[in-house]
Amino acid sequence: MTAITVNLNPIIQLTDNQFYQLCRENPEVKFERNAEGKLLIMPPTGGETGNRNSEISADFVIWNRQTQLGVGFDSSTCFKLPNGANRSPDVAWIKKERWNALTPEEQEKFPPIAPDFVLELMSPSDSLRETQAKMQEYINNGVKLGWLINPKMLQVEIYRVGKPVEILTSPRELSGENVLPGFILNLQIIWG
């Protein structure tokens, strides 16, 4: 099952606060909102994807605790991008200075900021084309580095500002480059 798109715009155009309230009142449903204001209802992940997400997140948490360079987020965090979309990457990271520049209220709700780094892990229910479009949307809105990991195809697509997408087949590891200094993701936890 892929994401279901619901267009409420002809009836009501939800404000940011109304969208936030909708999400709070329906915690069992994972919502995103695209730049046109259409609601996306995201299906839950299965066991394999959930486990992979957990393993990847653990590596980020350990690295971030050691370096203390920024703030990490899991897939339940929704960000308000500059184009108006509300997106929830599987893993996100923001430099500490940028995060600290937000007000406490902005940090509490859906932070109005594009992360410095995002990761999307394809699950069997995801559409590759839609996920690639989401990755490009992240980059167009200020994300500096993005990884789209596709376990089924044993591929990683690397998105960078001002550069073409780089596609790697069965890489052993990924480097956080200058965005995540010193971070290395061992992909054996993904490929099995």
Image (spheres, rainbow, N blue to C red):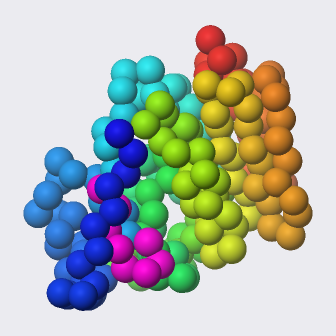
Percent x, y for residue 172? 80, 22
The answer to whether residue 12 is above or below residue 72 is below
Task: Kindly identify the residue that appears in the image at 82 percent across and 54 percent down.
Answer: 165
Q: Is residue 36 left or right of residue 134?
A: left
Percent x, y for residue 188? 69, 17
- Is 54 in front, or is 23? 23
Task: State yes or no: residue 39 in magenta.
Answer: yes
Report whether residue 112 is seen.
Answer: no
Q: Is residue 11 left or right of residue 109?
A: left
Percent x, y for residue 56? 56, 32
Image quarter hosting the N terminus: top left
- Which quadrant of the view contains residue 86? bottom left
Judged from this view, the residue extending furthest toward the right is 163
The kind of secondary structure the magenta stretch mainly shows is loop
Judged from this view, the residue extending furthest toward the left is 25
- Is 110 in front, or is 16? 16
Report whether residue 180 is seen.
Answer: yes
- Which quadrant of the view contains residue 20? bottom left
Residue range in magenta is 34-41
